[in-house]
Amino acid sequence: MTAPPILRVERATAVDIDAITALINSMAFSKDGGDLLPRSRDSVANAIPDFYAVHEGSELVGCVAIQNMGSKLAEVRSLAVVPGMQGRGVGRLLVDACIEEAHERGLNTLFALTRKPVFFERFGFHEVEVVNFPKKVWQDCYVCPRFIECDEVALVLEIEDPDDDAY
Ligand SMILES: CC(C)(COP(=O)(O)OP(=O)(O)OC[C@H]1O[C@@H](n2cnc3c(N)ncnc32)[C@H](O)[C@@H]1OP(=O)(O)O)[C@@H](O)C(=O)NCCC(=O)NCCS
């Protein structure tokens, strides 16, 4: 019997651009539902250094981006796991990678806009008013098909500085 493949989160590369674009847009907002803001191939390509990816074999099974929105603030966005792989820890790998990167970048806050607040609460995120993020609202939400009837929740995670505990 062959063991199931070990899933690893890695930085995305240019090879992943088309698969990431397809995955995000397969879950994009539409009149029938969807959970993600759609993204063009160019938008993904330009942001590829911010993306993490999880593969099973050569297949992309999940992605996320951590995008700077200020000197100490970044957004966790475009988090997606292919339906057949949900519930197997891929989303956790991706969010954990963003949190680790937030520490490495010296950020003090991560935020997410989502229709899945309970998922993010598992990582310590807590709900805040969306008006805390005007740049985001102007830049991305303004072009969203659901802008007028948005049902997303804003959540933040304060990143603890390990040096704060050093007495
Ligand atoms: C939300 C999503 C990323 C979760 O990915 P996943 O790989 O299924 O999540 P995981 O298997 O890593 O689950 C991690 C934990 O979160 C929990 N969880 C998963 N989805 C959840 C949800 N929708 N609500 C609450 N908790 C959830 C799991 O039970 C698990 O808990 P545990 O560690 O106590 O066992 C995935 O369902 C998805 O791609 N959804 C569509 C796109 C989307 O909504 N993206 C997020 C908006 S930004």
Image: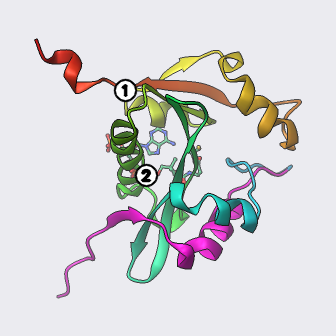
39 left or right of 97?
right
Q: Which residues are magenta?
A: 1-30
Some atom of ligand 1 lies within 8 Å of the CB belonging to the residue at label 2: yes
In the figure, 132 relative to 155: above or below?
Answer: above
Q: Residue furthest top?
A: 167
The image position of residue 63, as x and y in percent, is 51, 60
Please report whichever mark, 2 or 1, sits nearer to the chain's N-terminal start: 2
Residue 152 placement, left or right of 147:
left
Q: Which residue is mark 2?
A: 91
- Residue 56: % across, % down: 39, 76
The disc label shown at residue 159, or none: 1
Residue found 20% across the figure and 86% down from its top:
2
Mark-to-mark CA distance, 2 and 1: 19 Å
Of labels 2 and 1, the one closer to you: 1
Residue 121 lies, with reference to residue 4, above or below; the image says: above
> Is 22 part of what is drawn in magenta?
yes
> In what element is the residue under mark 2?
helix
What's the residue at 61%, 72% (across, down)? Answer: 17
Q: Quadrant of the C terminus?
A: top left
